[in-house]
Image (cartoon, grey):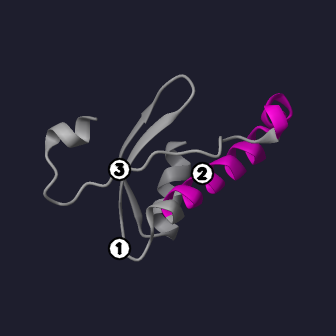
């Protein structure tokens, strides 16, 4: 996943500052150009990661309910350059 995120950073104006994983989801802290909406950022990240996972591990798609790697939902919280470490920790 790290390599995929690095490729996304090179192709788009999306810089991954933090990536955290849990059993069934991930947390990312990204910095992006103000021309990208939060939904555009999430959609871009989710679609590229899913495509790369399915390319590298085609059996995964068959094991998933309905063949979808991600759920439809997401949570976005914005942080300005004035954000503090407590915000970044959440």
Please tell me which of labels 1 and 3 falls first in the chain.
Answer: 1
Left or right placement of residue 80 versus residue 73 in this view: left
Residue in the foreground of this view, choosing between 59 and 34: 34
- From the top left corner, tell me how far across and down residue 35 is, in percent: 41, 77
Please tell me which of labels 3 and 2 falls first in the chain.
Answer: 2
Region of the chain picked out in magenta, as a range: 41-66
Q: Is residue 51 rendered magenta in the image?
A: yes
**Which residue is tagged 3?**
77
Above or below, comparing residue 9 to residue 29 in the picture: below
At 58% from the left and 58% from the top, the residue drawn is: 43
- From the top left corner, tell me how far across and down residue 19 is, in percent: 40, 40
Neighbour class for label 2 at 10 Å: few (<14), some, many (≥20)? some
Q: Secondary structure at mark 3?
A: loop
Proximity of marks 2 and 1: CB atoms separated by less than 8 Å: no
Please tell me which of labels 2 and 1 falls first in the chain.
Answer: 1
- From the top left corner, tell me how far across and down residue 76 is, in percent: 42, 50
The majority secondary structure of the magenta stretch comes to: helix
**Which residue is tagged 2?**
46
Neighbour class for label 3 at 10 Å: few (<14), some, many (≥20)? few
Q: Secondary structure at mark 1?
A: loop
At 58% from the left and 44% from the top, the residue drawn is: 73
Disc number placed over residue 34 in the picture, else none: 1
- From the top left corner, tell me how far across and down residue 29 is, in percent: 35, 48
**Figure quadrant of residue 23:** top right
Tell us which disc is closer to us: 3 or 2: 3
Residue furthest toward the top?
23
Q: Is residue 89 rendered magenta in the image?
A: no
Q: Secondary structure at mark 2?
A: helix
Tell us which disc is closer to us: 1 or 3: 3
Left or right placement of residue 69 versus residue 73 in this view: right
At 53% from the left and 48% from the top, the residue drawn is: 3
Separation (CA) of disc 2 from disc 1: 19 Å
């Amino acid at each position: 996943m790290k390599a995929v995120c690095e490729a996304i950073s090179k192709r788009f104006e999306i810089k991954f500052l933090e990536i955290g994983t849990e059993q069934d989801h991930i947390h990312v802290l990204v910095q992006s150009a103000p021309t990208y909406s939060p939904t555009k950022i999430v959609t871009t990240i989710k679609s590229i990661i899913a495509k790369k996972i399915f390319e590298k591990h085609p059996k995964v798609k068959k094991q998933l309910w309905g063949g979808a790697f991600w759920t439809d939902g997401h949570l976005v919280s914005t942080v300005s350059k004035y954000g503090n470490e407590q915000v970044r920790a959440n």
